[in-house]
Amino acid sequence: MFDRIVRAIRLDPTLYRQVADDEQYTTEAFIIVLIVSLFSAGGAAIGAAMADTNAVLTFITNLFSTILLGWLLWAIIAYFVGTALEGKSGITEMARTLGYANAPGFLGVFAFIPCIGWLVALAGVLLSLAAGVIAIRESMEFDTTKAVVTAVVGFIVYIVTRIVIGIVLGGVGALGSSILG
């Protein structure tokens, strides 16, 4: 598994083709997403604690949004956009390849480092986006231009949804704090 994670981070297209073609990697893709989510949420929570804000809420929000929105929602959207562009994939195949594309998100654990942490975390997001393009291209079996369109549309919807969820959960957290406090 470690070798495949390294290949995913290196943006090796043959890995994404291999993962797209083999259902045995579905559980492994979920494990990668879960570990990346825990690392990223942990880094964000440490940063929140250092800033004297609610670290638990930050952890839960980041964990939820990375797993459900960052992976599953993007996979579903990429599937629908990609098939509209005449791609050939299934939702589980797309989820598998995008699960591996989440591997560079490990860099999110460094988000708490003052001054540069956000840059390292951003590098992880950008690498994951690049990996997502390759994953979509290999899963959908179409050209890079269509993969970029599919990835960008999916990523934009992901960002908007993540912001909305963050606002809602932030409001719920503030309401809970005012009621309990």
Image (cartoon, rainbow, N blue to C red):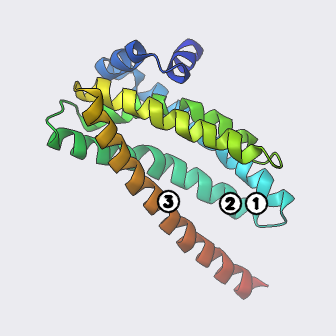
Picture mark count = 3
Circles 2, 3 touching at the beta carbon (< 8 Å): no
In this picture, residue 120 sits left or right of residue 28: right
Q: Which residue is mark 3?
A: 162
Asked which secondary structure carries label 2, the reply is: helix
- The picture places residue 154, in percent across and down from the top left corner, at 35, 48
Q: What residue appears at the point 66 percent right and 42 percent down from the top-left corner?
A: 121
Earlier in the chain: of badge 3 and badge 1, it is 1
Asked which secondary structure carries label 3, the reply is: helix
Residue type, label 3: Arg
From where the camera sits, is residue 39 visible?
no
Query: What's the distance in space between the residues labelled 3 and 1, CA to CA?
Result: 18 Å
Task: Specify the quadrant that holds the N terminus.
Answer: top right
Q: What residue appears at the point 76 percent right and 66 percent down from the top-left corner?
A: 54
Q: Which residue is mark 2?
A: 58
> Observer-nearest residue: 75 or 150?
150
Q: Which residue is mark 1?
A: 55
Give the number of the mark in front: 2 or 3: 3
Query: What's the distance in space between the residues labelled 2 and 1, CA to CA?
Result: 5 Å
Q: Residues within 10 Å of mark 2 (few under 14, many from 20)?
A: many
In the rendered image of this protein, does residue 14 appear above or below residue 61?
Answer: above
Residue type, label 2: Thr
